Image (cartoon, rainbow, N blue to C red):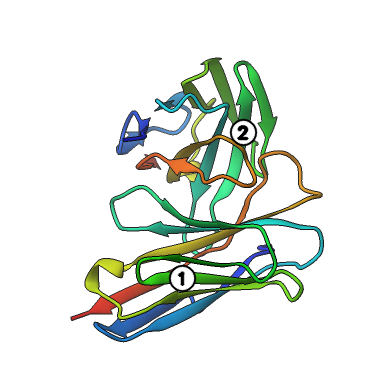
Amino acid sequence: DVKVTQSSRYLVKRTGEKVFLECVQDMDHENMFWYRQDPGLGLRLIYFSYDVKMKEKGDIPEGYSVSREKKERFSLILESASTNQTSMYLCASSVTVEITEAFFGQGTRLTVV
Amino acid sequence: ILNVEQSPQSLHVQEGDSTNFTCSFPSSNFYALHWYRWETAKSPEALFVMTLNGDEKKKGRISATLNTKEGYSYLYIKGSQPEDSATYLCAFIRTTDSWGKLQFGAGTQVVVTP
């Protein structure tokens, strides 16, 4: 059974804290993604990685960074958390970006207070 | 601005009824369209990936059609059951899009009542 696992389901952090969201996949996929989901909006891509140590900015990268030191792990970092980063964060992985399905983690609901 | 529009935003269906809803997207430079089902407290799960105009896909009671020339896809649920309650997301990518840039719609929330 294929799996994408995110380290936390719920997280509460204070403004200004550095926050790490971890994602691990066991499918040997090259491509990994971080999205955020807000009410009334579609999933928005924050960052994308197509190989170890390789990354591409998505549509909303400001205030975020990522790390991919190993193929199976893709971390999202909020350098200095702000209240407007309160959101649902979803990690995904896929064989190809375009024509094969993405596998998603269960999501992390982050609240920044 | 969402390039992908899903309608309606939400709908309520009686158990046993059939329903359908729409995903609209720009028709130029089409590459692929994805459909996902996202149940509460679970991970989004892929239903279909469609690449050809006129394509029809089926998975149990759920099916989808694709019209790339006019820029829309329909998802159909036949004989809705309570377990079909979920948010259904579509996402598309164009040949001109940068790597990784699947564009998601905001979803159609389906509630099936017994």
The quadrant in which residue A14 appears is top left
Q: Residue at x 49, y 61 (%)?
A: B89
Q: Nearer the viewer, residue B5 or A51?
A: A51
Q: Within 10 angstroms of label 2, few (less than 14), some, or many (20 or more) residues?
A: many
* Rendering coords of residue A37 (x, y %): 48, 51
Q: Name the mark nearer the viewer: 1 or 2.
A: 1
Residue B112's disc is: none
Instruction: Tell me: A66 left or right of A88.
Output: right
Residue at mark 1 to residue at mark 2: CA–CA distance: 30 Å
The answer to whether residue B49 is above or below residue A97 is below
Task: Specify the amino acid type for callout 2.
Answer: Phe
The quadrant in which residue B6 appears is bottom right
* Rendering coords of residue B100 (x, y %): 66, 40
Q: Which residue carries the number 1 mark?
A: B63
Task: Specify the amino acid type for callout 1.
Answer: Ser
Q: How many marks?
A: 2
The answer to whether residue A85 is above or below residue B109 is above
Q: Which residue carries the number 2 mark?
A: A48
* Rendering coords of residue A74 (x, y %): 50, 24
* Rendering coords of residue B66 (x, y %): 62, 70
Q: Residue at x 51, y 26 (%)?
A: A77
